[in-house]
Amino acid sequence: MDWVAIADDDVMSLKAAGHILNQRQMRVSALKSGAALLDFLKANRPDLILLDVKMPGLSGFETFQAMKERTLPGEEIPVIFLTADESQEAEEFGLQLGAMDFIKKPFAPGVLALRVRHTIQLVRLQRNLEAEVERKTRENERLSLHVVQTLAEAIDAKDAYTKGHSGRVASYAREIARRYGYPPERQREIYMIGLLHDVGKIGVPDSVISKPEPLTPEERQMIERHPVLGARILERIREMPNLSIGARWHHEKYGGGGYPDGLQGTEIPEEARIIAVADSYDAMTSRRSYRDVLPQSVVRDEIANGKGTQFDPVFADILLAMMDEDADYQMKERESR
């Protein structure tokens, strides 16, 4: 049953509107002032509010503004103003505030009932549509994340000593972004960027990636091609244009001298600067064919010493703070071989 609250200081109008809506099987709550309506809304949520414009104390417009200040986005209750005022300016002002409609008094029973019913149905349909779009968006995001995670696992599998590397880099980068002040949507984006930062290694021979001995100059060139290869792959994903940022520039250095483009400072995109420090941290806190996980103090010194040369000082400081909170050194690669 649809539920309508009516706020009007005119008792006759209250009774008339209540009678009309009751006859159409609508539940009605009658209130005699704007203040009473505001108090009523503390514990009740009708489907629609009929609000008289001219009332002693708080006017209808003032009551509506107070309602908006107390309501969270997405939880607004639709309002139709009741008025005997023929002023076009008043009607324009009410609609600008966000009212759904105006109904002139005295109102025709059929018109009142139809406008109320249609407004409730319209708002309900709109919210159902928004909920469905949001649900589909979440489904698509979950599907995209699953595909990306699977691809990242395939990349890491090229080297037995990098299992889980992409996921850890993505998690560290997301936490750095959160502490820096990124909103949730951008945090999710940088997580995806982190997952795929090494995608270019698909084009590097396994024998080179997993080689325990020092690389030859030719093999080093193969490795240093992976940022460009990765960017070329990810640039084709038009739905997520920023994915290629981490892949191409996570080996650039804040002070210059990195690859593939020799960028420095703020020339390097912010996301890539975050990925760079997260990537280096994980490389030092993971097992390799030639060494075990480095002691936390050694890793901390490397990050601190790289501020301004290898790493953006801001993001390096955030990671150092994360390390200082990690007294038991839990933030590292932990899987058994």
Image (tube, rainbow, N blue to C red):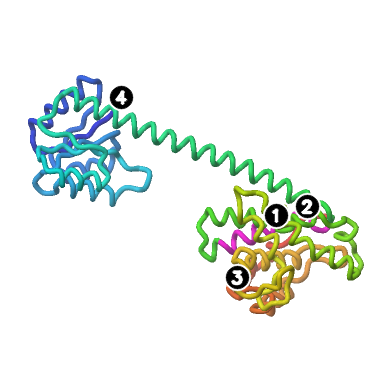
- Disc 1 on helix, strand or loop? loop
Identify the amino acid type marked 2: Ile
Please, what is the dominant secondary structure of the magenta stretch? helix
Q: Disc number at residue 315? A: 3
Asked if the residue under mark 3 is in contact with the one under mark 4, i.e. CB atoms within 8 Å, the reply is no
Is residue 20 something that shows in the picture? yes
Name the residue located 55 percent from the left edge and 61 percent from the top edge: 178
| Dot 4 crowding, Cα within 10 Å, few <14, some 14–19, many 20+ | few
Would residue 118 appear left or right of 315 to someone viewing this image?
Answer: left
Q: Nearer the viewer, mark 4 or mark 2?
A: 2
Cα distance, mark 3 to mark 1? Answer: 20 Å
Where residue 283 appears, x then y in whole percent? 76, 65
Give the mark nearest the N terminus, 3 or 2.
2
Task: Indicate the quadrant containing the C terminus: top left, top right, bottom left or bottom right.
Answer: bottom right
Identify the amino acid type marked 1: Leu
Name the residue located 55 percent from the left edge and 56 percent from the top edge: 186
Would residue 165 appear left or right of 73 to someone viewing this image?
Answer: right
Give the mark nearest the N terminus, 4 or 1.
4
In depth, the one of 55 and 193 nearer the eye is 193
Give the mark nearest the N terminus, 2 or 1.
2
Residue 110 is inside the magenta segment: no
Residue under label 4 = 1
Q: Disc number at residue 155? A: 2
Where residue 126 appears, x then y in whole percent? 39, 35
Q: Which residues are magenta?
A: 161-177
Cα distance, mark 4 to mark 2? Answer: 56 Å
